[in-house]
Image (spheres, helix red, strand yellow):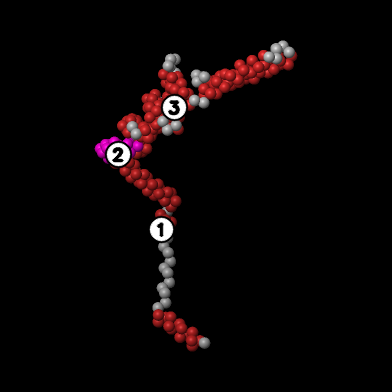
Amino acid sequence: MFRDGDAFAAAGAALCLLSAWAIGQAFARGALARWLAVTIMAAVLVPALHWMAHFNQTARGLERIEAYLAEPPKPPEDVCAMTWNFLGERYARMDRWPDAARAQAEAARLAPHRRIFLQWGIAATTAGTFSAAQRAYRELLARDDADPLAWLGLAGVSIRLGDRDEATRALDRLRGFAEIRTRRRRSAATSASSAWCGRDRSSCRPIRRAPRPAEPTRRARAAARRAGAVLR
């Protein structure tokens, strides 16, 4: 039922309800023998239980999906890409990381999207196949060399592979991203300050605090005490 199962589910449910109503009316009129009720119930329950038990086997179900992708008739490439991506995410949830990396690699081959490349790299890294993860990040950077997550992933797997040259190149590029971000923040702060002040720069003078009054010296305090004593 994997092939177009969702397309026929609604129509199948409607036909089942209509059939159940028609059979019930037939029994009510006495058109059918009562012993047929047991036979009809068995004919309905046995296939239903069979499919429920069949769909409960997750591994077998995923194998059937892969068979759907490999066997003729071949699905369209966009359907294959989405299905491989689904398999990769499902395998990742099951902690089957080598299978997840393999599925995401197939999905990236058919639909070279940034998200799929990152999922491929993460799955391959978790599976311990660092060379495959390095390939995933390199292919992503070949399409977009300004992706910081791809440079970060490439730096991590290159360090684990002992590829110092690639790791150094990736880390240098990440430092460049940090410097660009710092300059952008400063530029944004300057622009915001200019927009607040407007053309009149005199209104943007720094606020100067009033000087604190000097504390009285010892002589002044002594003189104040003597004056207080005289007044008393």
Q: Which of 170 and 101 is in front in this view?
A: 101
In the figure, residue 184 lies in which quadrant?
top left
Q: Nearer the viewer, residue 232 or 210?
A: 232
The residue under label 1 is 205
Q: Distance between the residues labelled 1 and 2?
A: 51 Å
The amino acid sitting under disc 1 is Arg
Q: Give the range drawn in magenta.
A: 153-171
| Mark nearer the N terminus (3 vs 1) | 3
Q: Which of marks 1 and 2 is in front?
A: 2
| Mark nearer the N terminus (3 vs 2) | 3
Question: Is the C-beta separation of discs 1 and 2 under 8 Å?
Answer: no
Q: Percent x, y for residue 197?
A: 43, 52
Find out whether residue 75 is within the magenta segment: no
- Give the tally of numbered discs: 3
Indicate the secondary structure of the residue bearing disc 3.
helix
The residue under label 3 is 87
Bin the neighbour count of mark 3 within 10 Å (Cα to Cα): few under 14, some 14-19, many 20 and up.
many
Q: Percent x, y for residue 24?
A: 69, 17
Is residue 38 rendered to the left or right of residue 229?
Answer: right
Bin the neighbour count of mark 1 within 10 Å (Cα to Cα): few under 14, some 14-19, many 20 and up.
few
Above or below, 54 against 172 in this view is above
Q: Residue 61 carries which label?
A: none
Question: Is the C-beta separation of discs 3 and 2 under 8 Å?
Answer: no
The residue under label 2 is 159
The amino acid sitting under disc 2 is Ile
In the figure, residue 118 lies in which quadrant?
top left
Q: How far apart are marks 3 and 2 (CA)?
A: 29 Å
Q: Percent x, y for residue 25?
A: 71, 16
Question: Is the C-beta separation of discs 3 and 1 under 8 Å?
Answer: no
Q: Nearer the viewer, residue 79 or 60?
A: 60
* Res 185 seen here: yes
Q: Percent x, y for residue 208?
A: 41, 62
